[in-house]
């Protein structure tokens, strides 16, 4: 049985549960940051091919805002949070109360960039903290990097190790809701979790669901 076939719906359900706990923690932190009620949900966790992953982001040449960090400690890997430009602009405009902020502008304000990195810190930190609590593993995020580029260029750095053993990645779909517009979804992003090959077994063994 190859690597891809070892990941079952049970494994993905466990990751979704961890994702929902992480999202709840992140929503609390974002609510404090924005001084308004923010809700976050993880409607779906799935294993998708590299090609399907590109489609989820709108295609490899689609310009996106990407937050990237390495995972270190008992497990190693890469994590990405990717937002379409329009949605990233909307969120940061609300966050810094500046409707002129635009990632398409050649000179983006430092305040907006810092706000985006803080959002990345909160989201990735909340998810990895939940994963660490569930597994008992020591998991540390590096300082996240921020890039506005083609999705294919941003994600390629995380695929180098994984592509040696797999053609698939884990996608944690994440939705963020703003109380000002009710239950209408305001921001939709994708977490791409790319553990290094040896770390898959470590994570699931710690969760009691061996590969």
Image (spheres, grey):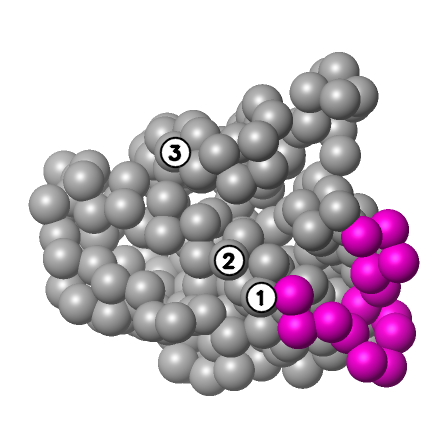
Mark 2 residue element: helix
| Camera-nearest label, 1 or 3 | 1
* Residue 172 magenta-highlighted: no
Q: Earlier in the sequence, mark 2 or mark 3?
A: 3
Q: Does 166 sit left or right of 10 as displayed? A: right
Q: Is residue 41 above or below residue 109?
A: above
Q: Does 177 sit left or right of 123 as displayed? A: right
Task: Give the quarter of the image for residue 210.
Answer: top left
State whether the magenta stretch is mostly helix, strand or loop: loop
**Position of residue 59 measured from the top left corner of the image (x, y, whole percent):** 80, 66
Residue that protrudes farthest toward the top in the picture: 182
**Residue position marked by numbered label 1 in the rendering:** 114
Residue toward you, 207 or 164 = 207
**Residue position marked by numbered label 2 in the rendering:** 118
Q: Earlier in the sequence, mark 1 or mark 3?
A: 3
> Could you tell me which residue is drawn at 66 percent across and 73 percent down?
110
* Residue 108 magenta-highlighted: yes
Query: Does the CB distance between marks 1 and 2 fall below 8 Å?
Result: yes
Mark 1 residue element: helix
Residue toward you, 155 or 104 = 104
**Residue position marked by numbered label 3 in the rendering:** 25
> Could you tell me which residue is drawn at 32 percent across and 64 percent down?
141
Residue segment shown in magenta: 98-111
**Position of residue 209 measured from the top left corner of the image (x, y, whole percent):** 20, 39
């Amino acid at each position: 049985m190859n690597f891809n076939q070892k990941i079952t719906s049970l494994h993905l359900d466990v990751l979704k549960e961890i994702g929902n706990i992480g999202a709840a923690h992140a929503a609390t932190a974002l609510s404090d940051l924005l001084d308004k009620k923010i809700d976050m949900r993880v409607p779906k966790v799935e294993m998708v091919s590299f090609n399907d992953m590109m489609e989820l982001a709108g295609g490899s040449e689609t310009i996106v805002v990407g937050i990237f960090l390495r995972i270190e400690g008992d497990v190693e890997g890469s994590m990405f949070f990717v937002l379409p430009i329009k949605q990233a602009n909307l969120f940061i405009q609300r966050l810094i109360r500046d409707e002129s902020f635009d990632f398409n502008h050649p000179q983006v304000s430092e305040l907006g960039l810092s706000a985006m990195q803080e959002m990345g810190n909160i989201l990735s930190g909340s998810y990895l903290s939940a994963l660490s609590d569930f597994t008992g593993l020591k998991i540390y995020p590096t300082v996240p990097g921020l890039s506005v580029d083609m999705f294919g260029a941003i994600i390629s750095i995380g695929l180098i190790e994984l592509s040696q053993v797999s053609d698939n990645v884990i996608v944690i779909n994440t939705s963020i809701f703003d109380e000002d517009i009710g239950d209408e979804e305001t921001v939709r992003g994708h977490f791409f979790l790319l553990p290094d090959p040896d770390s898959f077994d470590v994570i699931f063994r710690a969760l009691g669901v061996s590969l």
